[in-house]
Amino acid sequence: MRNRITIQRVAELANVSKATVSRVLNGYPHVRPEVRDKVQRIIDETGYQPHNIARLLASDRSSIIGLAISSSAQVVFNDPYFPAITEAVSKGAASKSLVLSLFVSYTDQQGQDTLGRILAGGLLDGLLLTADYKGISVLPQWRQADIPVLFIGRPTNTVGINYVDVDNVQGGWLATSHLIDLGYERVATIGSNRNAAGDDRVTGYRKALKQHGLAWDERLVAFGDYSPESGYAGMQALLPYKPQAVFVASDTMALGALRALREAGLRVPEDVALVGHDDLPPAVQADPPLTTVRQPIARTGQLAVDKLAQIIDASEGTPAENSVLPVKLIVRESCGALPAK
């Protein structure tokens, strides 16, 4: 019966038009309560399932949102942050009965062309974008698209932008202040200048130095691209200047830094203390376990979906509305505050 029932049959049983059944299915408000109840009862009794294409044509909604990640496929599938944020967004979409489509890599011209076609295709109700990297911006494309867009992470250009982010300045400040409070004076950083998050974490590092009366020393600052290899190279660049402790702006870079310290014959934390950022699963698995700044990835993904859904449902233009979530320091053995097991 479920496979044979049609919207025409539901309309006949309820003694209403197909248009009325469609309005009930799509939640239109201008249906009398007694008619709505009768149609809904027939739908429940017959087990009618509306055809998705028909619902799309009737409601002008697809119930599909996209998640576009601004990194190469190699980075996306090797950096544990991206599976974590994808899982969080997927759960958020499911909680709102939305279908999620994932689009990986628009860092080159081919990828940007693909994203342009996605934006112009009319399939998506809305799009989530991970924050862009400097020199790689999709803002001109989505500004021309007639669908709601929200960024996960603060983009480099925030004018008229909706985004959800974590407090990356607070993250850099918490990590650096913790190391200074433990008595370290030569505190270095391996930051990133690829995007706004990297800039903010270095800003937090610099803010902590200033508040604790320590001078900024360019020799104690290295930069990477969030990969383990760049963390390894960054630590090698810092070692000649004998840092006592290092704040690394991502856990993946911290793992590379840890390898460089080991190869140099240095122990963590006895010779050099280490603090990362993100609190991804590899931080717990590291030897020693990594002190790090936990960013609320699950909450970020859910909030991003919630806000995008609000924009989609808004009857009028929605002003830029930004949310910045707090972060938390998670103390483990790599900073020297806990005894080794």
Image (cartoon, rainbow, N blue to C red):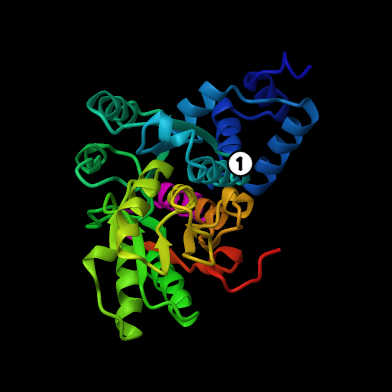
Q: Is residue 233 visible?
A: yes
Q: What residue range appears in magenta?
A: 303-320
156 magenta-colored: no
Residue 50 image offset from top left, x and y in percent? 62, 25
Dominant secondary structure (helix, strand or loop) of the stretch shown in magenta: helix
- Quarter assignment of residue 24: top right
Q: Nearer the viewer, residue 136 or 176?
A: 176
- Quarter assignment of residue 321: bottom left
- The quadrant the N terminus occupies is top right
The residue that appears at 35% across and 38% down in the rendered structure is 70
Q: Which residue corresponds to mark 1?
A: 94
The residue that appears at 26% across and 79% down in the rendered structure is 215
Residue 335 image offset from top left, x and y in percent? 53, 68
Q: Nearer the viewer, residue 203 or 149?
A: 203
Q: Nearer the viewer, residue 79 or 181?
A: 181
Please, which residue is most extreme toward the front here? 265
Please, which residue is most extreme toward the top here? 4
Q: Amino acid at mark 1?
A: Ala
Residue 246 against residue 174 in the figure, above or below: above
Residue 173 image offset from top left, x and y in percent? 40, 73
- Badge 1 crowding class, 10 Å Cα cut-off, few under 14, some 14 to 19, many 20 or more, is few
311 magenta-colored: yes
Q: Is residue 124 visible?
A: no
- In the picture, measured across the screen, residue 23 lies left or right of residue 167, that is right
Residue 190 image offset from top left, x and y in percent? 35, 57
- In the picture, measured across the screen, residue 206 lies left or right of residue 254, that is left
Q: At numbered mark 1, what does the secondary structure look like: helix, strand or loop?
A: helix
